[in-house]
Every structure is written in structure tokens, then in C-alpha cells.
Amino acid sequence: MVDGLAEKKELEIYIHIPFCVRKCAYCDFLSAPADKETRGRYVEALKQEIRESRKLGETYEVSTVFVGGGTPSLLEGRQLAEILRELRDDFSVREQAEITVECNPGTLDGDKLKSFRDLGVNRLSLGLQSAQNEELRLLGRIHTWEEFLESFRLTREAGFSNVNVDLMFGLPGQTQKSWRDTLNRVLDLEPEHISAYSLILEEGTPFFRQYGERAEDSHEKSGQETMAGVSEKKGAPREPFPGLPDEDTERQMYEDARERLEAAGFVRYEISNFAKPGRECRHNLGYWRREEYKGFGIGAASLLGGCRFRNQEKLGPYLQGQFAVTDWEELTPADDLSETMFLGLRTRQGVRLTREMRRIYQKELERYQRQGFLLEEKGFLRLTDRGIDVSNWILADFLIEEQMFDI
């Protein structure tokens, strides 16, 4: 074992809980409803997988833990306790580690939240999406705005002082007025962090089937590039359903969010994420900065030792203790550089430019700075507000082929 925590490398942990009460109409995440027995067996398998990775604990110290899903708050408090206890038994977890649990309104109560606090959970992420009950109904959410308010009240009562609220715009039937009302209602609650994402039409979801095959026009979950109404490939929706906001309206929704949140003292530290100063999500920042992370649970991704891989997605074999990985990829220098640019430029700070970056991306840097999309300050390159509006297009230009990378 490495002597001394100071000698250990930093590691982020992601734990995937693939269960939910009901699948939302837009969701393509690896999640589904499951009975109590299945959830219990999954917790036992998770603990075994963590235990079998304990050798990593000799080299790494855990700086953040993110329990995502699905709906992790479906678990009983004792089940989450068992998972985190196993993690602490097998890994060195920093005393000040950020430990986040994703929660959905309708799955929380005071006792569960108190147990989370007692376990060292110090950050919650609440999936609201909209403050409008009709929009929530169309999304297939299991809660109302009033039920969210009660859940938020309980988080404060339990002593949580670092809470994120997830919001979505570009929803069916959503207007600028209803979006602004959602923003205002959430800001009145004074959360520490707000994530504002635009709706994506993901293949295989009810929304995709309802609105037509627009996967090639769909955008990343970034809140800046937009979809224009209903696809004409499949004609109109098969049943009466509100239309999607047009491209200009959706872009204005993003601007409304940026302006309103920044006026309320939030800092946009990443394209779709806003936080009060000092309340940025450290776990997500680690992803964008390409820090090493290990994923546990079906479908969970990892970045370790210069390799990227993913756990297999089949629940049955996992419950039997088969923890196979798939999509194994040893990253090349070109991969490292491309990902550094592609992910780092999503953040407000941007990317520290090196001589190598200037050489390889000379044409792109000159063109986008001349067009006002990129700005270099004190050795860092970042997107301007104009650049964020077209960021997917710009970021794609920083993906390079191996033969272009001359080392």
C-alpha cells in the first residue's frame, strides 16, 4: 500500500442506481422500474463489485462520490448506508469529499434525508424539470410542483445547504412565459446550484416516436443549440400533443436562463450549469477536466490509467456477480488532446493553451477568435457568449485524427 494519503492519486467515484418509479417520456438513461427484491439484490452486487476493486484503494484517494440513476432516492436509507460503508472500507475517502445523491420528488421523506446526512452525504440534486404541472405531466414525471416544494422544504429541514435543482427547457407546449415563471419560482427557493438543460429527442423514447426521427438533428445536453418544431419525416404526431418551441424561442429560453440566473448571483461555470460562488459541482468539474474516475453499477463508465471503458448493461448477469466491462479503449495522445479541448471548452475557465495546442489548432484558433467565438485571456482559451450559442459546431472542430497528431 502507498504510504500516506498525500502520495495517492485523486479519484472520483460514480455509482449507478438503475431504478425508477416510472420511465419518463424523454428519458433514454439506463433505468427502469424494479421490485424491492431486485433492488436489494442489486445493492448486494454493487457492494461486491466495489469490494473486488479494493486494490485501487492502494493507489487512489476518493475526492468525490456521485450516486446517480435512475432514482437513487428509491433506495432505503440503510441500503445507501451499506453501499457507502463498503466504499469507505475499501477506499480512502477524503474527509471533505463531495458526496452527491440524485433525488426525485415523491421518493423522499424526513427520515430518509436525515439518514443521508448521517452517512456524510453533503449535496443533493433534485430533479424538478418544470414548475408547471401540465409540463410535468407531459414529461411523465411522477410529481407535481407542490410535491417538489415539500421535498425541497424537507431537504432544508434535514440540514442540507448544498442543493441543485435540475430544469429543462424546449418542452412540449412550453412558452417563454412559462419558462420564466419556472425560473422565478425556483429562484425564490434560493438553491445553491441550478442545471438548465434543453430537451433532446433521444431515439427509442416516447418523445422520439411522438415527434419523429430527428436523432441526426438532436443536440447534446448543453442548452445552446436548438431543435425546430416537429420533424416532417414522420409527419405530425400520431395523437394530439403540444408542439415543441421553435429554434428562436428555445435559444431565447437559454438566454433568459443565463440573464436571470446571473442577475440572481449565479455564475455560469459550464454551458448548462449555474452555481452560487463556491458551490460548483466538484464531481462534474472533474469530468470536464478529465480527472480519473471509476464507475460502479451496470452501464457505469470509467477513465483510469489512460483507458476508457464501461460496465456491461445487462442486469441479470450483474446480479449474479458478473462484472464484465465493454467498450475498452486505450486513449492515444490525439484522444487526450481532443478530449481536453472538447470538454474543457465547455467550462467558463476554458483550457490552458499549450504550445502543442497552438501548433495543431492554429487555423481553428485564428478563425474562431477572428469571428468572436473564442477568446484568449491570460493563457486560457474559452468560448464567448456568441461561441456558446454555436458551441457544438465549434467543439466538433477540435476533434482530431491520430495521423494529424505529430509527436
Image: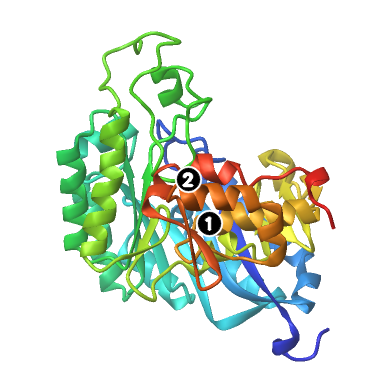
Label 1, residues with CA under 10 Å away: few <14, some 14-19, many ≥20? many
Please name the residue that numbered disc 2 is placed on: 391
Left or right position of 183 against 96: left
- The image shows residue 62, relative to residue 196, as above or below, that is below
Q: Could you say which is closer to the camera, residue 404 or residue 88?
A: 404
Residues at circles 1 and 2 in contact by the CB criterion of under 8 Å: yes
Q: Position of residue 390 (x, y in %)?
A: 44, 42
Q: Amino acid at mark 2?
A: Ser
Q: Is there any visible trace of residue 34 in the rendered image?
A: no
Identify the element where label 1 is drawn: loop
Please name the residue that numbered disc 1 is placed on: 345
Residue at 42% over, 51% down: 372
Residue at 74% over, 91% down: 4
> For the view shown, which residue lies furthest in the bottom direction?
4
Q: Could you say which is closer to the camera, residue 247 or residue 358?
A: 358
Q: Could you say which is closer to the camera, residue 379 or residue 273?
A: 379
Colouring scheme, one of rainbow, by chain, secondary structure, one colour: rainbow
Label 2, residues with CA under 10 Å away: few <14, some 14-19, many ≥20? many
Residue 292: quarter of image: bottom right
Q: Is there any visible trace of residue 347 in the rendered image?
A: yes
Q: Position of residue 103 (x, y in %)?
A: 40, 56
Left or right position of 341 against 184: right
Q: Quadrant of the image for the C terminus?
A: bottom right
Q: Position of residue 138 (x, y in %)?
A: 29, 30
